[in-house]
Image: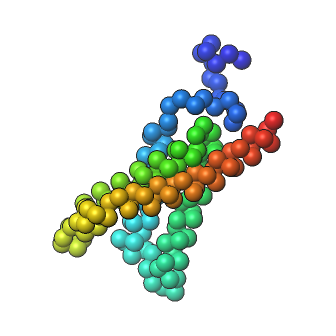
Amino acid sequence: MNPAAGSHFRPSFDEAPRGRLPWRLILLLGAVALLRPLMHITGVSGGDGLPKGLFAVGATVVISAVWIGVVLLARVSRPFLTLVLAGLAYAVLSMVLSAVLSPVLGGELQGPFAQPIAIPMVLIVNAIWGAVVGGIAAGLRAALVARHR
């Protein structure tokens, strides 16, 4: 089947083009991770017998699993880079969310924009999160490609 002939061609794992990045998907994955700060803001992640840190780690694991599942199901050709960028998108979106909500909820600007020296660290930490999850996704993708050969 010739993909240039106008047919609806869905590349297999090993035939995915290396061209453009899925920017909409990257932003969507970054936005999905906003569940973490939103759960904190709304108080869902606190108290009632479950330590706050354990809840945050659990939420991170669930979001990471969703990210991996989505890039594999979408057959993203560059899962590592896609998820590094999703981590960076989350970092930017969470900083903006903090800048918008902290004055409303706390009466003053809080978070990285209140202490700009923290901005690079927020970006680095979330890029590392995306890289770890992206590495796992890339490894799983490679295993799927090998299995389908």
Residue 115 % position (x, y): 25, 66
In the picture, measured across the screen, residue 27 lies left or right of residue 136, that is left
User: In the displayed structure, would residue 115 be above or below residue 33?
Assistant: below
Q: Quadrant of the N terminus?
A: top right
Judged left or right of residue 84, residue 119 is left
- Residue 113: horizontal and vertical position, in percent? 25, 61
Q: Residue furthest top?
A: 5
- Image coords of residue 106 (percent x, y): 23, 73
Q: Quadrant of the C terminus?
A: top right
Q: Is residue 10 above or below residue 110?
A: above
Q: Nearer the viewer, residue 143 or 52?
A: 143
Q: Residue at x 55, y 70 (%)?
A: 58
Q: Residue at x 32, y 60 (%)?
A: 119
Count how many numbered circles sit on residues in the image.
0
Quarter of the image holding residue 105? bottom left
Residue at the image position 70 percent from the left and 33 percent from the top? 14
- Decide if residue 66 is in sight here: no
Residue 72 location in percent, x, y? Answer: 63, 45
| Residue 36 visible (yes or no) | yes
Front residue of this view, candidates 97 and 116 = 116
Looking at the image, which residue is at 51% across and 59% down?
A: 129
Left of 104 or right of it: where is 45? right
Q: Is residue 44 above or below residue 9?
A: below
Picture quarter containing residue 66?
Answer: bottom right
